[in-house]
Image (spheres, rainbow, N blue to C red):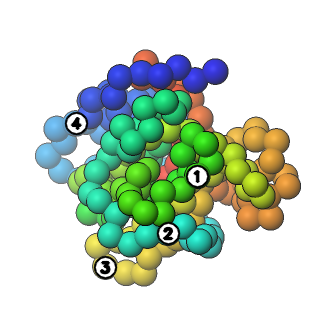
Amino acid sequence: MVTRAEPPTRRTVIAACLAAPALQLTGLGLAAAQPVELAPTPACDDGDHPTPAQTEGPFFKPDAPLRRDLAADAPDGDRIIVAGFVLDTFCRPISGAMVQIWHADETGRYDTAGYRLRGHQFTDRSGRWWFTTIVPALYSGRTRHYHLKARKPSGPILTTQLYFPGEPRNARDRLFDERLLLRIGETADGRFGRFDIVL
């Protein structure tokens, strides 16, 4: 069961991201003056392939607002921090990359009239991105998922989807791809989902 928590601060989000067991980083601090080198992670081995693309689906809307806190749009939803790094295929962090997310609400509906549970941001100088949002509900024909777009400061846009491990509907969803599974953990702020985007 997911517990609701107060919106996390930037410090707790970054601390959670750095503490995630799969991250395996060294020398990464909040006030690092120089770009940092990241050790390879399970999501990015030197020479690895980019993150697989998937359909954007029928509910994408352009011009999503610049914001990280989407959970305020759904106060009754179960909060989760979705976060990671944007990396190139040599595991180097990409700063200034755009990351956009949109997903269903706690009832399985998308907001097609406005921008509820939709937003975008840019990675920091160490390639980090994060959103505070909610766990999307299931809806007919699909397993639980987030839609995501990412783009380097220049280059093509990656469109993909992120999935939850252990969902019974994963096996029945024709779009499900295990390479796009979030790594789920718990922090002091509640549930945390980690995914590194490789461009």
Question: Which is more N-terminal, label 3 or label 2?
Answer: 2
Which of the numbered marks, if any, corresponds to residue 109? 1
Which of the numbered marks, if any, corresponds to residue 60? 2
Badge 3 marks a residue whose secondary structure is loop
| Disc 4 residue crowd, few under 14, some 14–19, many 20+, Cα 10 Å | few
Question: Which is more N-terminal, label 3 or label 4?
Answer: 4
Discs 2, 3 touching: Cβ within 8 Å = no
Residue 199 lies, with reference to residue 44, above or below; the image says: below
Residue at the spot 42% in from the left edge and 81% down from the top edge: 156
Which of the numbered marks, if any, corresponds to residue 30? 4
Residue 168 falls in image quadrant: top right
Badge 2 marks a residue whose secondary structure is loop
Amino acid residing under circle 3: Ser
Give the number of the mark in front: 2 or 3: 2
Farthest front residue?
Answer: 113
Amino acid residing under circle 1: Arg
Residue 59 lies, with reference to residue 106, above or below; the image says: below
Give the number of the mark in front: 3 or 1: 1
* Cα separation between marks 4 and 3: 26 Å
The answer to whether residue 192 is seen in the rendering is no
